[in-house]
Amino acid sequence: MLITTGNDLPGYQVTEVLGEVFGLTVRSRNLGSQIGASFKALVGGELKGMTKMLADGRVHATERLVEEAEAKGADAVVAFRFDTSELGSTWTEICAYGTAVRARRQ
């Protein structure tokens, strides 16, 4: 599956637009990471547990997006993006989205 943040695929011609596709996951922070984040906020620095949670969430959201694109018969996704938002004080939503297309090499 070709995935690009661009609106086109250099070297390929988009032959069909199949529509928007999404991959969504909601992650909950565990109590340990919340306590660690509170202490880290006092001294500053990277919240490594939170960074790992978000990175893992992006991978999972991308996998779900690819599954949806493949189900539509796509072989590429253009205009790929991520969006994140907080749901309450302990949940983070991670959404991967883009446009599923069929493309052929020129």
Image (tube, grey):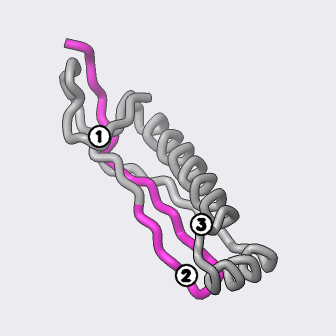
Q: Residues within 10 Å of mark 3 (few under 14, many from 20)?
A: few
What distance separates the C-alpha of mark 1 from that of mark 3?
A: 32 Å
Which picture quadrant has residue 17? top left
State the SS at label 3: loop
Q: Which residue is mark 2?
A: 87
Which amino acid, mark 1? Answer: Val
Q: Residue at x 66, y 62 (%)?
A: 48
In this rendered view, identify the residue nearer to me: 83 or 53.
53
Q: Position of residue 67 (x, y in %)?
A: 53, 40
Residues at circles 1 and 2 in contact by the CB criterion of under 8 Å: no
* Residue most extreme to the top: 106
**Taken as a whole, is the magenta stretch helix, strand or loop?**
strand
Q: State which tag comes first along the sequence, 3 or 2.
A: 3
Residue 15 in sight in this render = no
In this rendered view, identify the residue nearer to me: 30 or 102.
30
Label placed on residue 12: none
Q: Residue at x 65, y 61 (%)?
A: 53
Q: Residue at x 59, y 56 (%)?
A: 57
Q: Which residue is mark 1?
A: 78
Which amino acid, mark 3? Answer: Glu
Q: Residue at x 79, y 79 (%)?
A: 31
Q: State which tag comes first along the sequence, 1 or 3.
A: 3
What distance separates the C-alpha of mark 1 from that of mark 2?
A: 28 Å
Q: Position of residue 34 (x, y in %)?
A: 72, 80
Specify start and end residues of the magenta stretch as a single range. 83-106
In this rendered view, identify the residue nearer to me: 20 or 83.
83
Q: Position of residue 105 (x, y in %)?
A: 25, 14
Q: Residues within 10 Å of mark 1 (few under 14, many from 20)?
A: many
Q: Which residue is mark 3?
A: 46
